[in-house]
Amino acid sequence: MLAIPFIAPNAYVVSLANMALINLILAASLNLLMGYGGQISLSHAGFFGLGAYASGILNVKLGVTPWLGLPAAALITAAAAWVIGLPALRLRGHYLSMATLGWNAILVVLFNQLVNLTGGPNGLLGVQPFALPGFEGFAGLKLDTEPRAFPLVWLASLLVMLAILNLLRSRIGRALRAVATNELGADAVGVDSFRTKLVVFVLSAAMAGIAGSLYVHVNQYASPETFGVATSILLIVVVAIGGSGSYWGPLLGALTYTALPQILLDYEDAELMLFGLGMLIVLIAFPGGLASVPDALVRVFSRLFASKRRP
């Protein structure tokens, strides 16, 4: 994907690639919580927005460089997730979904009402892009265009995916899968299920905060409607379409979620209907999401060849 800025026909295609990689971070972090941990959260877009506004406000109001705003956004969203997770993660099933849904709604209200900080419904303006520092008399390079910002977004998404891969192979990752499979059984063998869920919830929110910081500094703007409850629901759909609990599922889901609406633009009023129909077909035909398609095709072909060999 690093070749995209060089082979893309225009900057718009590169902007879609940037958005796909940001969506990848969001989907992969939610998949960590939902696909591997079995916890459904409807607040992921809220953490995405909290990271965007935290980094953007630090830059616009206090003059903090985006390079410091990025880790600050991760820390702020992680702290918020820890505070919310302490009571919310004691709930299960749809009760947990309702609690996280309420948190997302509260954040959207704050984004709209704290006009002096967030810009209110008009959005946060004047956000500066990332910039490479100057050296030996050379001026710094601003990453203020989509092609210039792409390598940074690509690197951030790569590091997030590697971090998730290492986390899944660690003791916490094994404990997380045990909790998702059978929470009582995990407790019985000495796994602290609540602590495991809280740690992963905080890490997932921190990754969403990183995606938010990248989003606000690449687009140099943030608006409250981007981080609403509808976005949280769509992110769950993205994870399901790509393949919940699959490592490569979020990549397939993010690419589909970013590219498909662009393909359906010519259909205008039928766009939403066709998008929903496509999601239904995928989830009915391949319950494991797009990531399960290769395995499903292998099984189909193996059955066909096996039937031909029979006398």
Image (cartoon, rainbow, N blue to C red):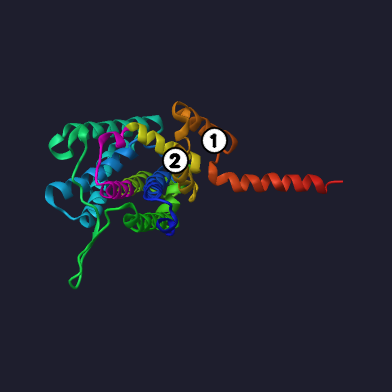
Residue at 20% across, 66% down: 134
Q: CA distance from mark 1 to mark 2?
A: 14 Å
225 w.r.t. 302: above or below = above
Please give left or right for residue 36 compared with residue 208 in the image.
right
Residue 153 within the segment the image draws in magenta: no
Q: Which residue is mark 2?
A: 257
Which portion, as a residue range, is magenta?
207-228
Residue at disc 2, secondary structure: helix
Please give left or right for residue 261 compared with residue 116 in the image.
right
> Residue flagged by tag 2: what amino acid is it?
Tyr
Residue at 79% across, 44% down: 307
Q: Nearer the viewer, mark 1 or mark 2?
A: 2
The one nearer the camera, 124 or 36, is 124
Q: Which mark is residue 168?
A: none
> Residue flagged by tag 1: what amino acid is it?
Leu
Residue at 25% across, 53% down: 70
Whether residue 103 can be seen here: yes
135 w.r.t. 185: above or below = below
Q: Position of residue 275 (x, y in %)?
A: 48, 32
Q: Which residue is mark 1?
A: 283
